[in-house]
Amino acid sequence: MKQILDFWGDTFSWVKASLGVTGIIEIIILSISVYYILRWFQKTQTWTLLKGLVIILAIMLAAYIMQLRVILSILQSAFGVGIIAFFVLFQPELRRGLEQLGRRNLRLAGLFDGAKNERFSEETRDAIASSCFEMGSEKVGALIIIENLTPLGEYEKTGIPLDALISTQLLNQIFEKNTPLHDGAVIVRQNRVAAATCVLPVSKNMSISHSLGTRHRAGLGVSEVSDCFVIIVSEETGHVSVAEDGVLTRNVSMEKLIARMEAIRVIEAPTKRFRFRKGKKNEKHVEE
């Protein structure tokens, strides 16, 4: 055991002497960064494209080792175009990654007091939950988006502005079949319906169940690109589902829906330390 410890001690001392403390820190940071970048790519449909890029790089390395000058010349000429092609191919994923990075908000301690602010009231919470299950019992489809820290103005512009106080009766009337406002999504901001018939981005996640329709895919899609809370009522089954941070939970109960809404209802400012907002975990779909 002592020999093993001495070996690793000597190895670490040699690495420290060769690279220095800053060099070791840089290697650790780069390793962690590469790991999370690869994990992020693996969760997107560009993972196959990335593997193709690795194969091309392997061919370049082999051509360099074997001194295949013609192949090297062709690959070097195509390298400049390849950089532009990379940004074109990965543009949706790069944008989504930057949006996710921007949502990891750094909140400064000591600049705010510890007062709690309500994102919406208990009356709004209960009205939304009651409306969803009333519509579910009647097999009326609905898609309700509750805005969080990320503004949803770009999607709000695609709908019809309402700016109406939320009530169970209002939501039931909006999503009533064959009415002008029933198609599309409703965006909720604080205690008001900001807009109805809003158009949302559809999720491109290939692991989504084929039994899910456009309403579920749109709800999941907007939760992938923002930190909103999404409630979906199925027109076929009447089941209520929720989507948050790219995770879809199907067929939730009234109690579970209220508990999930209560968890996001109150904003508590940090008081004594820096706090990073928790980012998106692995995208998975929970089906019951």
Image: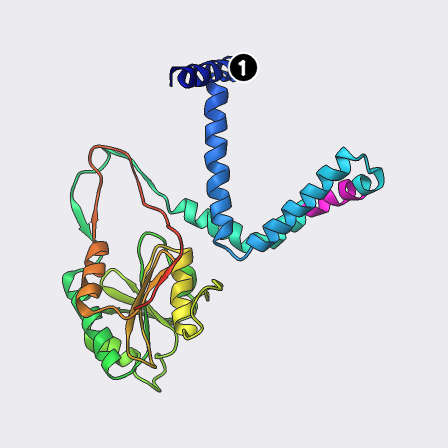
Residue at point 28%, 34% (across, down): 274
Residue 58 rendering spot, x and y as whole percentages: 68, 42
Q: Quadrant of the N terminus?
A: top left
Instruction: Classify residue 131 as left or right of residue 20.
Output: left
- All told, the count of numbered labels is 1
- For the point 64% across and 51% down, which residue is it? 52
Q: Residue placed at 23% from the left, 76% from the top?
A: 170
Magenta stretch: give its range: 74-82
Judged left or right of residue 277, residue 42 is right
* 107 displayed left or right of 209: left
**Up/down of 49 relative to 7, above or below:** below
Q: Nearer the viewer, residue 62 or 204?
A: 62
Q: In this orientation, which residue lies closer to the viewer: 232 or 70?
A: 70
Rendering coords of residue 163 (x, y %): 29, 68
Magenta-span inclusion, residue 79: yes
Helix, strand or loop at mark 1: helix
Residue lying at the far bottom of the rendered structure: 178
Give the image quarter of residue 277: top left
Residue 185 in magenta stretch: no
The image quadrant of residue 145 is: bottom left
